[in-house]
């Protein structure tokens, strides 16, 4: 028997329409050097329509790629709606990529138009003569230096066109947005989201058992809009009626503490390295005010336990950890403690990567592919499947990343019988010492709990006796000191003895990837080159 329910396609234009209808007055606040610029959801919707008409007039049609090279701001949000709603594909470019990588992905995606913020023109100019598919560059702001040759002005362009675009109907499985992985572990690979996958992902992030985004929320969007669609929050905002605060380039600890005090977000999304900076800036500022915040969402890398505890104890703020990947849209798991957990025991759950969100399935497999028990102790690779998990990479054959229809995440850890994931490592970062795994993530988190430590990353280095041993790279907090021996003694109270690193080095800062994670590839290379000043303890 077949059901006769209506078959309305899940298109992004319906997210836009819903938001502008029910939440017309809701706000998009863009932080600038001259104060905060405000627009309503309704105004953004009108301007998205104008942008779509303008792009159509530039010859952009169904399936064509339109790229953005932008900070988090109102115009970026307009492109988020205009491009997919007109049937084209939005390609968000990572502004922190090396020029070769940037040119590679623009050419690979065959972008035809790039919308760029004026402050980022010099970065894009470095590749202008290597991207032949790009026919038009639209500048958001003032293009004084003309470094990119002939450009169009965003405001002049959209001012020429009316609003009131009739968004086309299309297959909900059509491409809407594409994003390349940040290349932490290899060449960037493209992931193409559909209208349907973005719809379902947005719904998932509004459910109470995940992030529960709602009309009551105002979201400070620290995570860049080129990092997995800012974790989907721009679309969730229109679905749920959530204000957005767009920080543009003001992404350091002090301005973020100020934005939280003055613009009073209820939630904020960012990678843990940012929250670490914010914590230290807040401690130093004396007038930090987190009273509006119900949760700081940290994901993209493990959120250290001490960071969660420090925000709770010093500022009465919950840190909500999430797990995901470019390939998973990204929401896969969120670390909300189970109902009834006493407040003083919540940390046990908040320190885990997260609990699987409704809509996706997660399992752990052994090296030979057998599925392991979700008993909280069997260690293996996580595999995931679901309607917002990618089934392939754009234009690249990568069968090794899939297993019986499941995506192999490259993350190693355990899954328990309540659905909580604990990540001990990425397969590429694991440390195998004498045949046994040492978790670099657990070691890092433990060292970062020491009061003198600002940041720490642990990588595998080769060892004659044990094949591999951990090297601990530490950045101390300003004005604090601690010796390698002292840190090792501290660690000895937290982890088993055979995990304790013999090799230590102290750095002024840790290398970071284009989305702000510790760059372990670079640390390993520096070690092999002999550039690091390594202290070896007996
Ligand atoms: P890249 O793969 O280039 O780093 P992604 O942003 O897609 O770009 O990274 C996804 C990876 O980030 C995951 O596979 C996982 O290793 C890591 N990650 C994300 N969230 C967490 C978390 N809460 N705990 C530990 N690792 C995480």
Image (cartoon, helix red, strand yellow):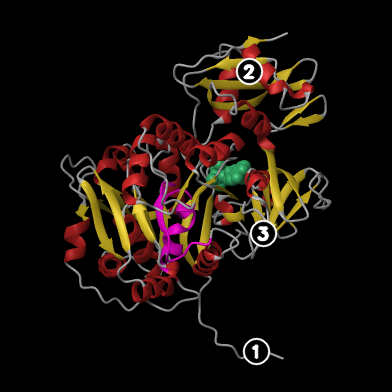
Q: Is residue 135 visible?
A: no
Which element type, helix, strand or loop, lies under badge 2? helix
What residue is at 29 percent from the left and 76 percent from the top?
Answer: 165
Circle 2 residue: 487
Which element type, helix, strand or loop, lies under badge 1? loop
Q: Is residue 448 above or below residue 349?
A: above
Residue 118 percent location from the top left of the image: 24, 45
Q: Is residue 52 above or below residue 314?
A: below
Circle 1 residue: 3
Specify the segment rendered in magenta.
212-238
What residue is at 49 percent from the left and 62 percent from the top?
Answer: 213
Query: Mark 3 vs mark 1: which is more N-terminal?
Result: 1
Q: Do the residues labelled 2 and 3 touch (CB within 8 Å)?
A: no
Q: Which of 209 and 61 is in front in this view?
A: 209
Query: Mark 2 vs mark 3: which is more N-terminal?
Result: 3
Q: Nearer the viewer, residue 1 or 152?
A: 1
Q: Find the distance from the CA under tag 3 to the CA under tag 1.
A: 35 Å
Res 339 label: 3
Residue 187 percent location from the top left of the image: 54, 40
Residue 143 percent location from the top left of the image: 18, 45
Q: Which of marks 3 and 1 is in front?
A: 3
Tell me if 438 is positioned left or right of 28 in this view.
Answer: right
Quarter holding the N terminus is: bottom right
């Amino acid at each position: 028997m077949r059901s006769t329910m209506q078959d309305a396609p899940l298109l992004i234009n319906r997210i836009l329409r819903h938001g502008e209808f029910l939440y017309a007055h809701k706000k998009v606040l863009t932080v600038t050097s001259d104060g905060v610029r405000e627009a309503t959801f309704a105004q953004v919707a009108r301007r998205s329509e104008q942008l779509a008409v303008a792009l159509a007039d530039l010859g952009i049609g169904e399936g064509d790629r339109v790229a953005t090279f932008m900070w988090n701001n109102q115009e970026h949000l307009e492109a988020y709606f205009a491009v997919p709603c007109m049937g084209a594909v939005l390609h968000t470019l990572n502004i922190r990529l090396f020029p070769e990588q940037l040119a590679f992905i623009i050419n690979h995606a065959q972008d035809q138009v790039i919308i760029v913020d004026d402050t980022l023109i010099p970065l894009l100019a470095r590749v202008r003569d290597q991207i032949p598919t790009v026919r038009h560059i639209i500048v958001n702001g003032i293009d004084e230096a003309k470094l990119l040759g002939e450009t169009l002005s965003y405001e002049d362009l959209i001012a020429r066109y009316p609003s009131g675009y009739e968004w086309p109907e299309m297959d909900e499985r059509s491409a809407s947005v594409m994003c390349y992985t940040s290349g932490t572990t290899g060449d960037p690979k493209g992931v193409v989201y559909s209208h349907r996958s973005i719809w379902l992902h947005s719904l998932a992030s509004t459910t109470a058992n995940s992030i529960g985004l709602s009309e009551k929320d105002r979201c400070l969007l620290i995570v860049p809009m080129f990092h997995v669609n800012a974790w989907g929050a721009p679309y969730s905002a229109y679905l749920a009626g959530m204000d957005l605060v767009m920080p543009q380039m003001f992404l350091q600890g002090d301005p973020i503490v100020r934005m939280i005090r003055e613009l009073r977000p209820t939630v904020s999304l960012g990678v843990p390295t940012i929250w670490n900076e914010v914590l230290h800036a807040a401690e130093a500022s004396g007038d930090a005010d987190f009273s509006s915040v119900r949760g700081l969402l940290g994901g993209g890398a493990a959120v250290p336990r001490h960071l969660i505890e420090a925000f709770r104890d010093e500022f009465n703020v919950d840190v909500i950890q999430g797990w995901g990947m470019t390939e998973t849209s990204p929401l896969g798991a969120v670390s909300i403690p189970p109902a009834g957990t006493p407040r003083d025991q919540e940390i046990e759950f908040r320190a885990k990567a997260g609990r699987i969100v409704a809509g996706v399935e997660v399992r752990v497999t052994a090296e030979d592919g057998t599925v392991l028990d979700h008993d909280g102790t069997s260690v293996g690779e996580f595999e995931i499947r679901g309607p917002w998990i990618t089934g392939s990479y754009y234009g690249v054959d990568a069968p090794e990343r899939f297993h019986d229809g499941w995506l192999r995440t490259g993350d190693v850890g355990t899954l328990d019988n309540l659905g909580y994931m604990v990540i001990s490592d990425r397969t590429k970062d694991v440390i195998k010492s004498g045949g046994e795994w040492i978790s670099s993530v657990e070691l890092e988190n433990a060292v970062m709990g020491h009061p003198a430590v600002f940041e720490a990353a642990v990588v595998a280095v080769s060892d004659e006796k044990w094949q591999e041993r951990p090297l601990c790279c530490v950045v101390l907090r300003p004005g604090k000191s601690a010796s390698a021996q002292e840190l090792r003694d501290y660690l000895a109270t937290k982890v088993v003895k055979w995990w304790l690193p013999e090799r230590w080095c102290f750095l002024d800062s840790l290398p970071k990837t284009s989305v702000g994670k510790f760059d372990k590839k670079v640390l390993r290379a520096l070690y092999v080159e002999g550039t690091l000043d390594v202290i070896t303890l007996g």
